[in-house]
Image (cartoon, grey):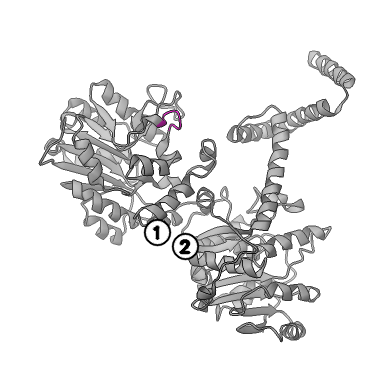
Amino acid sequence: MILTENIKRLGIYFFFDKHGDVDDYIPYFLKDLNKSLDRTVIVVNGKLTDKGSHILHQYGDILVRENKGFDVWAYKSALEYVGWETLKTYDEIVLLNSTIMGPIYSFKETFDKMNCMDLDFWGLTKFFKYDADPFGCIKYGYIPDHIQSHFIAIRKPMINSEEFYQYWSKMPMINSYSEAVGKHEAIFTKHFSDLGFKWDVSVQCDDLREFTGYPLLMCPKLLIKQYRCPIFKKRSFFHNIDDYLDNTTGEQTSELYDYLDNHTQYPVDYIWDTILKSYPQADIVKNMNLVYILQKNGKKDISHILATRKIALVMHVYFMDLLDDTFEKVSVMPKEAHIYLTTNTREKQILIQEKFKHSKFAHLDVRLIENRGRDVSSLLVGVKDVIMDYDYVCFAHDKKTAQVTPTIRGAGFAYKCFENTLGSQRFVCEVIETFESNSRLGLLTPPEPNHAIFFPTLGAEWGPNYDITKELAKELQLTVPISSDKPPVAPFGTMFWFRPKAMKPLFDKDWEYTDFPEEPNKIDGTLLHAVERIYPFIVQQSGYYPAIGMTDKFAAIEYGNLKHYLRGYNLGILGAGVGPYYPKMREEMCYRMASKGGIVVFTKALIKKVLRKVLPPKMKMHLREFYGKMRNR
């Protein structure tokens, strides 16, 4: 069926937000869509706030229903709500949902293009055939070519058909995401195509079939730029990282964002608004590649920023034998900065004041604080009266990590912290300019320690501090997702740059020294380490993102270290016959290590691998004979 003039079109838009909020990307989307619709029914799974209801009512009828059946039963409920006889009066019905964002190009362009095509149903994008059923419930036993269910348009011949009515009337309850795909999305297209109904998609990219099975997620920039795809997936910003890295080198999401920001009119703040409040920061930071590599000897002129922004350094000074080093670290701050140094005794305060008496900063204040709460109380109590006066602040403290021996290991941790917060005057300028250029950046922290005894930090970022961090989050009324299987993007070592207004919820709590444990206190599992991990979630709650920052010099070190670690693991794991790809390797190793005797099996395989490499040929022969006899016993 070709659509001509006086087209009567119904839109059924499925919406879900766990908070019941309606983010700005929704009305932006619906405003353009409604130019091509005669009526819109918005079906909401779960709750809807009063404010959200007011927004949505401007764009159509609202049907709020119980949050069950996923999008499939939302569509079914909306179709029944409109009524089958009324549905037959429409030339076209569009089923679509809030998992897509846009439009980049007006939907009118898409509708005008597809009106001229003789079709019974159509969509925006296609998922290509996959010769397996990962969901375990696809009736064909594989994933056929299909229109993705975030946008499917059905025309009158199909609307009026008994087959379409029966499809929805007999739709079983959908109890999981897998069933939503396996019992609807993956089969809808083939089911009706096999019945003789004609279909196509507007984003014609079959030439990418051998490139990727899922173009919209794996190469969204390409679809928008070269194929004029009007939408992108919200999931792009929090999708499973392993799946991305099984297909791409990790560039797909940041490339999408940069293109949207620099080459389209789409308001990218809408992306931040919706993903930060609802999705894990670890996934957002990785998928968006929020790691800033800044020049240690850069040449950026930030005089215009310093003329209009207030910059501060807050530093807790405890070790007088490190005072000369502390003086050097503080000296890299711009002369326009305000410096707040805190310490715990009057004697130390006098020594610090004497050391800094000739400094040329715009303001210098050496404050005496209680010796309770260490550097954390320095920031949350010691300077709470002034902190919100500033635009950008660096927080640091002198550092020994004396509990780690030999002490060079602790010195390496301190180097990592200072190099990537106060690495040089030029680097500090680069940091300030980075905050100025990235309005959603709330926290910039060095990468976590991973050398020597600190190596397990990678994978054990929570340590014994998860429960107490969750308690603190509850007390601070945070609603962003915090889970034990997603690491915090936290400043391990408690040195970082931040935007004070992004940290406001933390400073709104009236902290006192007595909130913190008395000295001496244990290393982990206290409020101090909960605060260390809560910083990035505070920022996220405020609508900003945390990120990692490094000097270019240290980025080279970090890359080399991580490559060395990964290569070492690969040598062992591949040598044990596990591979060849990361997800499979990790899954298999977890299984082997968890299985009875798994460690022994893995160790034996690794020893054999090493011995084969280092033993002379004659001994290798004897070794093979020995293992042969052992197997035959």
Crowding at mark 1 (Cα within 10 Å: few <14, some 14-19, many 20+): some
Q: Residue at x 73, y 31 (%)?
A: 602
User: Distance of mark 2 from mark 1, alpha carbons?
Assistant: 8 Å
- Viewport quadrant of the N terminus: top left
According to the picture, the residue beneath numbered tag 2 turns out to be 440
Q: Position of residue 546 (x, y in %)?
A: 54, 59
Question: Judging from the image, what secondary structure is the residue with disc 1 in?
Answer: helix
Q: Nearer the viewer, residue 16 or 543?
A: 543
Q: Is residue 619 left or right of residue 551?
A: right
Of the numbered discs 2 and 1, the one sitting upstream in the chain is 1
> Mark 1 belongs to which amino acid?
Asp
| Span colored in magenta | 208-213
Q: Position of residue 201 (x, y in %)?
A: 29, 33
Q: Residue at x 67, y 79 (%)?
A: 341
- Viewport quadrant of the C terminus: top right
Q: Residue at x 72, y 29 (%)?
A: 575
